[in-house]
Amino acid sequence: MPEIYYSLVNWLLQNWQPLVMSAVTAIAAIFGSSLYFKFRFSRSHSESVIGAKGNIGRDVQIRDVTVTVNDTRALGVVVQSLFEKNFPNLQEDANAKARANVLAFIQDLTKDFVDEKNLFRFSEPDMQYALTQAALAAARTSEATRRRALVALIKRKADASPDDALDMIFSAAIDVSKNLSREHLRFIAFNCLVRSPDYLGLPMDKRGEFINSVFSEFKDVVISNRLSGYCVSLGIAERSPLRRGIESIVAEDFLIERGLSKLTVLGGDISPEMRLAVRTQLSIQQEIWHMIDRWNDSGCSQMHVSLLGRVVAFSYLEAIGKFQGDWNELI
């Protein structure tokens, strides 16, 4: 027995290298086969998702799922997957509410998506990042206008060229919107409308009609230094040393025709009599004047909406159906 034992040990010592190589080869073969079958299963699953959601087109890789984005149904799959992979795991009730909010966001995003030719942009990393930020922001609120404002920004970004300067501004607007409530959106939109170029070229009576129709949407807008300070801190507004009332803004040419210097009008230093003359000419509803008085008397008259703020404002105005035009002409 000892002779057999010593012979076996001697044989192992002489042949250990081939034995080790054989064992390594066998393990590598088993591991490689496992990876191959896993890859084939994953690819088969991805193709089944594509077949169910859209035709073969330009693929978007979302970690372990590949979805083709060439119709709005597939876009919904992309949003859902990005949300699930990036949203923190909350308690059950909060998770359920977040998912419901995202589903509503997806419905708004995919509804009436006219320019489907731009869907290829959702394969770009920058676009997917913006889409993720929008979905995460939408998950946090059930407020419809906030959600639709995010949708407006996503659609405008998809329409823009990646080389366009506005493309990155849309991304910044999506990012800042997650920190804005409906109250903030209404406030920044109203301040944007106050200095709207739509007043230019209109006769005084038509300006009054415009103000009555547009400002009526903002009769209950909250006007406060707290809001203006917050907007300035986010970079969507700027402070001006000039405190200029709405009368001098909407009726600049009228006041100059009445003998005031442009410097006086731009500085907002007009008399109560001139303010009354403007109000008489405009024929604006009394309740709207009350709102304008609140704006004039607050520090908001020193606030100017920045370029980023105007993009945010237009997204809200589009969300409430007050603006459907070309943003490039207004930004």
Image (tube, rainbow, N blue to C red):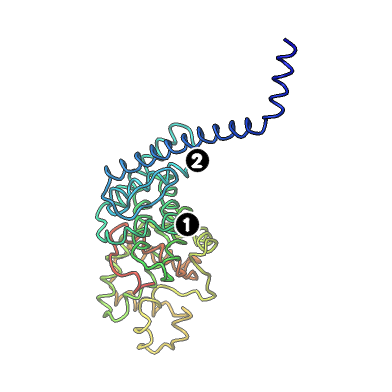
Residue at which label 1 appears: 175
Instruction: Give the amino acid at mark 2.
Output: Pro
Dot 1: within a 10 Å radius of its alpha carbon, few (fewer than 14), some, or many (20 or more) residues? some
State the image coordinates of residue 236 (x, y, percent, origin top left): 48, 64
Q: What is the quadrant of the N terminus in the image?
A: top right
Q: Nearer the viewer, residue 287 or 307?
A: 307
- Image mark for residue 26: none
28 relative position to 307: left or right? right
- What amino acid type is highlighted by mark number 1? Asp
Q: In this view, does 167 lie to the left or right of 29?
A: left
Q: Which of marks 1 and 2 is in front?
A: 2
> Vertically, is 54 above or below 255?
above
Q: Name the residue under label 2.
A: 88
In this image, 130 relative to 48: left or right? right
| Residue depicted at 41% across the width and 53% down the height | 131
Q: Position of residue 3 (x, y in %)?
A: 74, 14
Query: How many numbered circles are shown?
Result: 2
Q: Position of residue 91 (x, y in %)?
A: 48, 33
Mark closest to the chain's N terminus, 1 or 2? 2
The residue drawn where x is 27% and y is 44% is 51
Query: Which image quarter is the C terminus in?
Result: bottom left
- 253, 186: nearer the viewer: 186
